[in-house]
Amino acid sequence: MRSSNISTRPSRQYLLLACLFLSACASLPTALKDVPVVDVPYSQASQSANKDASVRWGGVIIDVENERDSSLMQVLFYPLDPYDSRPRLNKPSEGRFVIKSTEFLDPVVYAKDREVTVAGILAGDIERTIGKRVVRLPLISATAIHLWPISERDDFYRRGFYDYRFNPYFGYPGYPFYWRGYYGPYGW
C-alpha cells in the first residue's frame, strides 16, 4: 500500500469558516437574543401556573392602540421558526394575543399585516372587543419587540414559485414544459 501525504480531512480554517457562515444565517435578532424565555404554548397561556413566565411569541399585527402611558398591539399568533424566531406563516394560527409596551408604537411603522416577534412576561389576560363579541386574550408585557423587514424573499414564498415576476413567460406556470425532447406550452 502506498501512503499519501495529502490529508483527506478538511483543514481547520475551512471548518471555522463554515461555522461562521452557518452561525450568521441562524441567529436571533439582537433585540431578542439576551432575553431568557420559557417555552409556553399558546393554548396554555391562560393557565395561572404560566403567569409571570418569560416568553417569546410572534405573529402578524392586527391593530395598534396608543394610550396615555402605554401602547397595546393586537397580534395574530403564529408559531416561531426555531432558528431565527420569525413567525412561520405557513403554519396555522392559534389565536390572538396583545402586547403591552411602555414605548410609543407608531401605527404607521407597526402597520397591519407586518410580522413581529416579542419577548416579554405573560401578564395575564385582557378583554378586547372583536366585532360585537368581547373575548379575553393573553397579555404580554414587552421586554423587546422586533419588527421584521418586508423583503422580496417574503413575497416569493408567499406568492409561490409561479409568480409572473419570476417567470419569464409571464403567467404560464412552468412554461415551457420539457417532454420527450420537445418544449411546449402544455407539455405535449
Image (cartoon, rainbow, N blue to C red):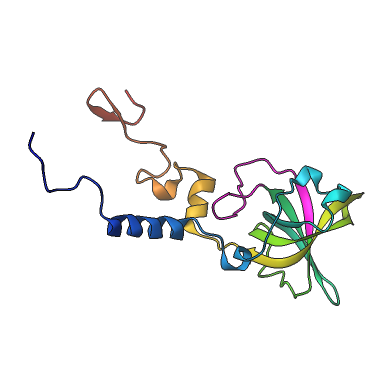
Q: Is residue 176 above or below residue 143?
A: above
Q: Position of residue 74 (x, y in %)?
A: 77, 58
Q: How many marks?
A: 0
Nearest the camera: 31 or 103?
Answer: 31
Q: Nearer the viewer, residue 104 or 44?
A: 44
Q: Quadrant of residue 85?
A: bottom right
* Chain part drawn in magenta: 79-98
Residue appearing at x 33%, y 55% in the figure: 15
Residue 5 in the image, given as x and y percentages of width and height: 12, 48
Question: Residue lying farthest left?
Answer: 2
Q: Quadrant of residue 121?
A: bottom right
Quadrant into which the N terminus falls: top left
From the viewer's side, name the closer residue of 125 and 92: 125
Residue that appears at 79% across and 43% down: 43
From this viewpoint, is residue 131 visible? Answer: no
- In the rendered image, residue 137, in percent from the top left (x then y), is placed at 84, 52
Q: Where is 171 relative to 17, above or below?
A: above
Write the residue at 34% across / 31% down. Answer: 185
Q: Is residue 87 left or right of residue 1?
A: right
Of the 4 image quadrants, the one containing the C terminus is top left
Residue sitting at x 46%, y 45% = 163
Indicate yes or no whether the magenta region holds residue 91.
Answer: yes
Q: Depth check: 157 or 92 in front?
A: 92
Left or right? Give the position of 20 relative to 181: right
Q: Quick check: is 178 in the magenta stretch?
A: no
Image location of residue 177, percent across then percent down: 33, 31
Principal SS element in the magenta part? loop
